């Protein structure tokens, strides 16, 4: 098993797309890349911790390779917006790929370059590729939010603009 860490705005919206894939053991909502030990949701949202909302994915690369995780990731975010995602703004919502191995770094950078060169978007890809740092698991009520609070999750995804963006920019693939 390997671990991958992706930030793509609100972590609630980043769990379901990965959680439903074969070879995925777990998808945990949490915080990374900041300077506060064991941050709370309120602290991260305040912008004082330096952390970003992210998901930590434990996966079997023989069943679901890292390259496939990257494909799923790109289709969940606006990769041209480095200042947050959809209506969630600021560092705590910035998109980033946190690599846990040198191979993940190479694959993530290559994937980013290919997406940038594809012409799919008319602005440059703004997602950062960074070394993984300590990952802190978010509070229990954030875990598997799409299952626990289905109606709120679906409304949030629609109101934030994420669902429409995904449909508009990836309809030829999804």
Image: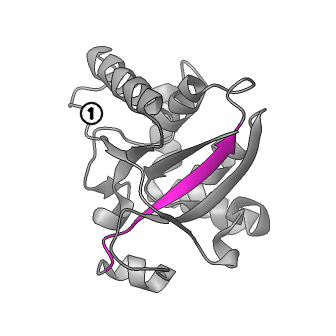
Disc 1 residue crowd, few under 14, some 14–19, many 20+, Cα 10 Å:
some
In the image, residue 1 above or below residue 45: above
In the image, residue 68 above or below residue 90: above
Q: Considering depth in this image, is 24 or 151 the residue closer to the camera? A: 24
State which quarter of the image contains the C terminus: top right
Where is residue 143? Give x, y as percent: 69, 67
Q: Residue at (74%, 35%) from the top-left corner?
A: 21
In the image, residue 174 above or below residue 57: above
As for residue 57 lying within the magenta part, the answer is yes
Left or right of 20? Residue 36 is left
From which residue to which does the magenta span run?
A: 49-59
Where is residue 80? Give x, y as percent: 28, 38
Where is residue 76? Give x, y as percent: 51, 41
Residue that mark 1 sits on: 125
Task: Evaluate whether residue 20 shows in this view.
Answer: no
Left or right of 48? Residue 97 is right
Q: Residue at (64%, 59%) from the top-left corner?
A: 28
In the image, residue 67 above or below residue 45: above
Q: Considering depth in this image, is 160 or 45 the residue closer to the camera? A: 45
State which quarter of the image contains the N terminus: top right
Q: Residue at (50%, 80%) from the top-left corner?
A: 38
């Amino acid at each position: 098993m390997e671990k991958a860490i992706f930030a793509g705005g609100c972590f609630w919206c980043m769990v379901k797309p990965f959680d439903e894939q074969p070879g995925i053991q777990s998808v945990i909502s949490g915080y990374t890349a900041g300077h506060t030990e064991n941050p709370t949701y309120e602290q991260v949202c305040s912008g004082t911790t330096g952390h970003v909302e992210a998901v930590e994915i434990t996966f079997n690369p023989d069943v679901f390779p890292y390259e496939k995780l990257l494909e799923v990731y790109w289709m969940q975010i606006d990769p041209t917006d480095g200042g947050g995602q959809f209506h969630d703004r600021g560092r705590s919502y910035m998109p980033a790929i946190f690599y846990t191995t040198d191979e993940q770094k190479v694959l993530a950078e290559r994937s980013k370059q290919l997406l940038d060169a594809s012409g799919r978007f008319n602005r440059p890809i703004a997602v950062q590729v960074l070394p993984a740092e300590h990952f802190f698991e978010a509070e229990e009520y954030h875990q598997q939010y799409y299952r626990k609070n289905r109606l709120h999750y679906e409304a949030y995804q629609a109101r934030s603009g994420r669902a429409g963006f995904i449909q508009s920019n990836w309809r030829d693939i999804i």
